[in-house]
Amino acid sequence: MRQPSPRHLAEGPRVGIRRFTPADGAEFTARARESQELHRPWLFPPTTEETYAAYARTLIEDPTRSGYLVCARESGAIAGFINVNNIVQGGFRCGALGYGVFAHAAGRGLMREGLGLVVDHAFGELRLHRLEINVQPGNAASIALARRLGFRLEGFSPDFLFIDGAWRDHQRWALTTEMRAASPTGQGRRAE
């Protein structure tokens, strides 16, 4: 991983990750509104500045969550978002990843790069041992991303999350620090 610029926690060749701020509301919500067709029925990020303010405040203040914006390195434009939710320390040291790319950045590998940076950060700075991704079985793009980053399918959880008015089944994917270290690149993902 390269030395990040002062505005990013970590950087890859094309993106950097940084924390959410209250000032990101206008750009984030505009991108979320533009991306509703892409996101539905899988996720529902905030689309108004009022709902963004509450969302960002939780990610900033709640010690069991840590939120990151994936931004283009050169322009700083927000390409997507990644949250580490349900963080538990102690003997568990685990968190659950949630993420979404915005339509203008979809299909370009930017989320793969950003998610790899967040995984590194979670296993390093956050001192987590295990990360989980819970994905609805029909979300092929998210499942492909989990696979590319070295996550393994561990199981199926019926009626796991309440999304869009109903309890939804999910596949559970996981990655541990040992799995990441044992991968061919030592990073749980293919060499670039």
Image (cartoon, rainbow, N blue to C red):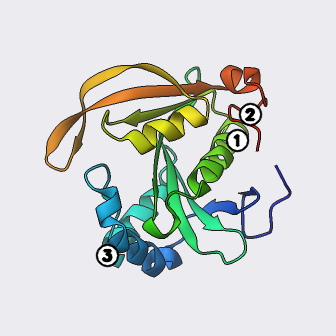
Q: Find disc 2 in the rendering and name its residue.
A: 187
The amino acid type of the residue labelled 1 equals Asp
Q: Nearer the viewer, mark 2 or mark 3?
A: 2
The percent position of residue 141, horizontal first and vertical second, equals 43, 44
Q: Find disc 1 in the rendering and name its residue.
A: 120
What separation in Å lies between label 1 and label 3 (alpha carbons)? 31 Å
Nearest the eye: 66 or 105: 105
Nearest the eye: 45 or 63: 45
The percent position of residue 177, horizontal first and vertical second, equals 68, 26
The percent position of residue 127, horizontal first and vertical second, equals 68, 35
The percent position of residue 17, horizontal first and vertical second, equals 65, 59
Q: Do the residues labelled 2 and 3 touch (CB within 8 Å)?
A: no
The amino acid type of the residue labelled 3 equals Thr
Q: In which quarter of the image is the C terminus?
A: top right
Label 1 neighbourhood size at 10 Å, few (<14), some (14-19), many (20+)?
Answer: many
In the depicted structure, whether residue 131 falls above or below residue 29: above
Check the image and name the residue furthest to the left: 165
Residue drawn at x 46%, y 22% as measured from the top left: 153
The amino acid type of the residue labelled 2 equals Gln
What separation in Å lies between label 2 and label 3 (alpha carbons)? 37 Å
Q: Are marks 2 and 1 in contact (CB under 8 Å)?
A: yes
Q: Find disc 3 in the rendering and name its residue.
A: 48
SS for dot 3: loop
The answer to which quarter of the image holds residue 32 is bottom left
SS for dot 1: helix
The answer to which quarter of the image holds residue 143 is top left
